Each structure stands twice: as C-alpha cells, then as structure tokens.
Image (cartoon, grey):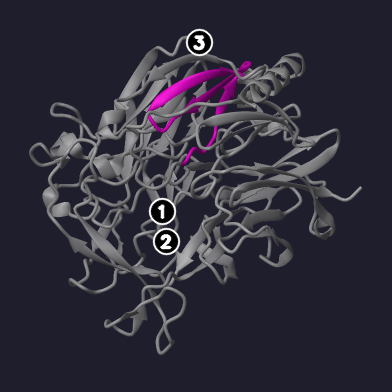
Amino acid sequence: MKILTRYVLLLFALLASYQLHAQVSSDRILRAASEPRNWLTYGGTYDSRRYSQLQQITPQNVENLEQRWVLQDQVLGAWQSNPLVVDGIMYITERPNDVMALDAKTGRVFWLYRYTPSPDARICCGANNRGVAILGDTLYMGTLDAHLIAIDAKNGHPLWNIAVADVKFAYSITLAPLIVKDKVIVGVGGGEFGIRGFIAAFDVKTGKEAWRFYTVPAPGEAGNTSWSGDAWKTGGGSVWVTGSYDPTLNLTYWGVGNPGPDWNPDQRPGDNLYTDSVVALDADTGALKWHFQFTPNDGYDYDSVQVPVLVDMNWPGASGKLMLWANRNGYFYVLDRVTGRFLLGKPFVKVNWSSGLDERGRPIPTPQPPGAPTWPGNQGGTNWYPPSYSPRTGLFYFSAWENYATIYRKETSAYQPGRNFSGGGFTVLAPAPGAPTVGIGRRSPINNWTDEVGHGAVIALDPRTGEQKWKFDQFDVTDAGMLTTASDVLFTGGREGYFHALDARTGRLLWKASLGGQVVMAPITYEVDGKQYVSVISGHILVTFALRD
C-alpha cells in the first residue's frame, strides 16, 4: 500500500510539473489588485484590505451559489490556512505543515508535500499554519518547529530548509510568510513560553538571513528601558499573523503579541516595548521607523497581532496614508502610517479595563478589583481574524465578541525553557442575568454571571469617525475573517458553521449555507475560465462555491 501511495503521489507530481507554471514576479505581487482572478498574498494585496474587484457574484444572484468541490483534511483544531490562487492553481497548507497544489476549478490534487515538525515543538494555542507565500515558482512555508522551507511550486520538491529559531525554547512559525522584493519575511510564535520575539527577513534564493528585528529590545537598544531588570530576556512579543507593506514608503507593518508572563505584569514593570504594538520597519534593513503601543504593560493577554489594514483617505493634519486597526483591547484605531501618529481611537465593545485614551492614544488604565470582571475578556473585543475594507463603501468590517468578560488571577511564574510561562490564569464570563445555566456554563457567585461565552457580531465601522454603521448579530461567537467584493457582497462565517453572504452597505443577510464546522479563516475569491469562485474553510473541510451555470 505504501509503495502504491508513493507511486500515485509521484504520478501527480510528474503531471503537475508539466501543468504548473507559477512565475509570480515581485511586480505581479505589487500589482495584485489589477489581477483579481488570483489571490497572490495572505491579505489578497499588500495593503491587506481583503477586497476583490470581482463582481460576477452580486446581491441579486448570490442566492444561486452552489457547492462546486470540497477538500477534506484531518487538522487538529480549527483549520486556519489561507489559500493562494495563481492562474487556476490553488496552494494550501494542512495537517499543519503539509502543502498541497490543487486545480482551483475542480479541487483535483496535483501534488502533496509532507513535512513532520520536530517532536520538541511546543505550541500554545493549536497546531496551526496560516498558509504559504509565493515568488517566481517557489513557495515558502513556516513550520511549527520554527523552520522556513522553500518548495518548488511545480512539483512540491523542497529546495531549502533553514532553522529560524531554536525549537527547544518553544519558538514556532504559524503565520503565512510575506514576500517583499527579494526577501521572505516571517515572525515567530511562543509568547506563552517566555521567548524573545522577533521578525526576520531571508533571501528568497538561498535562505540566508538578511535582517532581524527583535520585538523585545536588549540593553542598549531603543525601548529596553521600558523593561525592568532582566525581564526582557523572557519578554514574549511573538508575531503570529502576517503583516502588510507600503511599497511607496518601503515600510512593512507588523502587529506584536503579548508580553511574558501573560497575566502578571508585576513581574515585568514598565511599558514592555514593543509588545502589544504595531512596528513599522524598513523593508530592506529591518530598521525600526516608528512604533505605536496599544496596551502598555498588558496584563490581559491583549495581543496586538491583528492585521494592519492600509488605506488612503483625506484626514485633517495627516498625510492621508492611514492604517486602520480594530484591536483586541476593544478599541478601534486610526494611525498615520507614515509617522505612527495617533489620529482616532474609539471603543467598539464594552471596555472597563481603561476609561479612555489620552491625546496620544495611550490608554487610561482602570484595573478592576480582584474577582471582578474585566471587559473585553481574554479573547478580546476581536482577535487575529482578518478584517476587510471596501473602497466602494468606505467601511471597515471585522468580527467582534460582545458581552464577553474575564476574571483574572495573578501568579508568580518561574521561567523554565520550553515550559509555559503564563503568570496566572482566568475565568471566562458572559452576562446572563436571571438566566438558567445552559450547556457547559457554570453559575458564578458574582453578579449572576455564567462562564459561557458571549455572542458575536460582524461590525461595519466608518473609519473617519469610528462610528458603527451597521451590525450583524450572530447567536454564536464569531471568530471568522472577512471578504468584500466590488459588487458590495461581504462573505464571512461563525462558530456554528454557517457561511454568510451579507450586503456590505446595509448588513442585510443575502444568503447562508450550513457547512457544519467552525469558520475561522477569511474566505477568498478568484476566477477561472471566466467564472468567479469563493472558497472558505469550515472545520476540517475547504468548500468552494460558484454560481449555477
């Protein structure tokens, strides 16, 4: 059986070598918006708007969508991979460090590359991989044991494999790499294990490291005085969601995760730069140009790894080159992406850990008494799920968790290499005044709360004001990403397994399909032979839809 399986895979690889001719140049990635038939990067384009100019599927005909093909996988946990589509070929990761090439029209497999991470790999929150990057005819994948691998897109053969960090210290790579010019850029996970986080760039041909930026600065480096003593050595600052890039400014932007230990800020006095921040780096050198910290000395695990969405619009006293950011801490931000200057900040869910933001955007802390709930909860007002911005509507769309709070507890943690370094824990709460306990919820003696999770919503904000324009409530908590199109259709999903199409202007439900598994990663859309397709992952399946013929 093993010999037969190898023969079949070899046959697929031979067939693929004649059919797959990726040749994605840097210029094509730069102009990705001009070829909406493809999906060339994690965010669709360098600005990470997840907006497609395809418009064959409209509010009027979306109810005629039908399932075209399905791919099954055996991922542990929610499958979070973001497919790429290049000239009719889809590339996707699974299991979580295997890579597959498919016919994007039929789902037929061309080749499969398998990689088994080291048994020493330690992952905080699921054995996840969020996809590959492509340049020329080479794919790039980060692994759970902190390797970066280059793979021939024509046949699935590995070209080079380098160790980015030491797996024995619980470093990992779960994000999809970002290609900028002749470099492939990645960040490392492991913030719950006392790592010292970093972002690094490597030569696409050889894998040789070009630059490295540490998200937790050492003595003598700018920002180190925001740490006390040797706390920086185990300061966390992981980077586990793909950043964005502005080619005009030659700046690449990355969100940075929580400090370590997570829930006991008393062990690390100070602001703890550059954790819970966005950093703007020179794409050629990795030099820090500016930073903005959302949650100084974070004691709530409010990772700021959300996707930086880049837009251009008039703004009084600013460059007009803006960054939109719905943060896990419950605030929506607008920043000047040239300088990092704070322009706007407004809560989009209930917030009580802070009473507001000052004129620089720094939060005014209002820590709650021990045993009292903190809003938003540990999962935040939103999280890493990719948002979307539509230049047609001028609105910013994202998933939010409402009525969601947490009771935190602090503990002193001793650092041990490769072991969890959390500094405490938490109890998740959601309001249910007078309601009976349901499901796995447990009645809390505090204010008649239960430890069930709150409910979710898709929120559309006007970024000029931070005001909500519409909201689509979901019974379950939603942690799905967004996709908008030039026909004003928004695609998203939720934990119940529904795949939704909404009117991007009003939030009206246009169509939904029950897929049976949790929808987490944002959908993508592409075109093959004149037909528009939409693909979404639900649980352990990738489902692709198109309009009926």
Please tell me which of labels 2 and 1 falls first in the chain: 1
Query: In the shown orientation, is residue 375 left or right of residue 489?
Result: left
Query: Observer-nearest residue: 144 or 63?
Result: 144
Front: mark 2 or 3: 3
Q: Give, as a single range, the part of the protein colored magenta.
A: 128-152
Point 76% across, 14% down: residue: 18
Question: Up-down: is 538 above or below 291?
Answer: below
Q: Nearer the viewer, residue 373 or 99?
A: 99
Label of residue 77 in the image: none
Relative to residue 21, is residue 470 depicted above or below? Answer: below
Counting from the top left corner in percent of width and height, residue 54 is at 76, 42
Who comes first in sequence, dot 3 or dot 1? 3
Q: For this view, does 494 lie left or right of residue 425?
A: right
Badge 2 vs badge 1, beta-carbon distance below 8 Å: yes
Residue furthest toward the top? 206
Disc 2 is placed on an element classified as loop
Q: Residue at x 17, y 37 (%)?
A: 232
Badge 1, how many Cα within 10 Å: few under 14, some, many 20+? many
* 170 relative to 429, above or below: above
Q: Residue at x 58, y 54 (%)?
A: 519
Residue 502 in view: yes
Q: Which residue is mark 1?
A: 327
Q: Which residue is mark 2?
A: 381
